[in-house]
Image: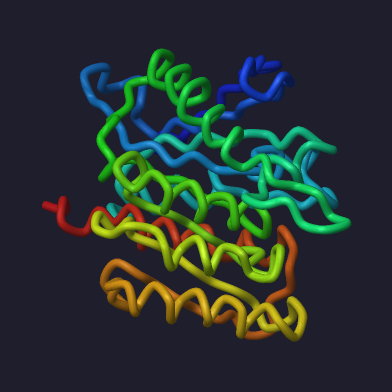
Amino acid sequence: MSTGQLRKHECLRSRVLRNQRDLVVYLPPGYDDEPWRRYPVLYMQDGQNLFDRATAFGGVDWNIQGAADPLIHSGDVEPLIIVGIYNAGKSRIPEYTPTKAPKLGGGRADRYAKFLLQEVMPFVQDQYRTLADSSATGIGGSSLGGLVSLYIGLQHPKTFGRIAALSPSVWWHQRAILRFAQAAPVPPRPRIWLDVGTREGQRTVPDVELFRDLLVRKGWKLGEDLHHQVFEGAAHNEAAWSQRVGPFLQFLYPAADTKV
């Protein structure tokens, strides 16, 4: 049984952000066997946490390859490319936040979106056989990475048709993401995975529920193009998020309709 493969691109320079970072790209099983085939792409934030314990925060990675390979082989998940975009260390909070908050700073998410759209995506599309339409293109992350994924995904729904937001930091700057989402035009409506754990602090579950309710008012339908889930006992860390990789991949990239 073939397995997926990982390819690393080091020190991708950004003119937009005036810094550099690494990318790790997961290619699905069979990628080299079908040179004519093109694949959906999921762009993930905090890329150093996704595939490798040696680079992951706290030494715990999401084991995305270990979750994706068997689901692709079983026909539960569509074969896809997953791009892990490393965060830039001290620049992580500024780049992952849409507004500048008192004392915390931030507010460079628009520039980060420009970096993703104008630098990362063209690079990936040049290097790999990708499907470029919005229905095949996703964005995702956790915590502030989930916040910026919601912000960019809702801001560019004609580019990103799927969003994975694990434990998103809805709290940022007095829940500024709620005001942004309320004003966001729909349709189109990206397919959204939205989750949170009960051991992430008192505010996190109700904050994420507020965001869920706002999406429902704007036309998203639970169980169809919106999945919301509260994970009992789950903390705000890589170990908890690693347990949700298989479920969110199955929701965002289901392959049930392609089974023979």
Q: Residue at x 67, y 24 (%)?
A: 17
Q: As rendered, which of 154 and 235 lies closer to the eye? A: 154
Question: In the rendered view, how is the structure colored?
Answer: rainbow
Percent from the top left, x then y, of residue 68? Answer: 46, 48
Considering every residue shown, the one lying at the far left of the view is: 260
The x, y position of residue 134, in whole percent, is 28, 41
Side of 227 relative to 37 (left or right): right
109, above or below 35, in the image: below
Kindly indicate the quadrant of the structure image that contains residue 158.
Answer: top left
Dividing the picture into quadrants, the one containing residue 213 is bottom left
Image mark count = 0
Quarter-wise, where is residue 124 in the image?
Answer: top left
Q: State whether residue 76 appears in this view.
A: no
| Nearest the eye: 259 or 167 | 167
Q: Report the residue at 73% width, 51% height from top.
A: 100
Q: In front: 25, or 144?
A: 144
Residue at left offset 61%, top offset 26%: 23
The residue positioned 35% from the left and 78% from the top of the image is 216
Q: Is residue 127 visible?
A: yes
Q: Quadrant of the N terminus?
A: top left
Which residue lies most toward the right here? 103
Q: Position of residue 8 (x, y in %)?
A: 62, 22
Image coordinates for residue 256, horizontal then vertical, percent: 21, 59
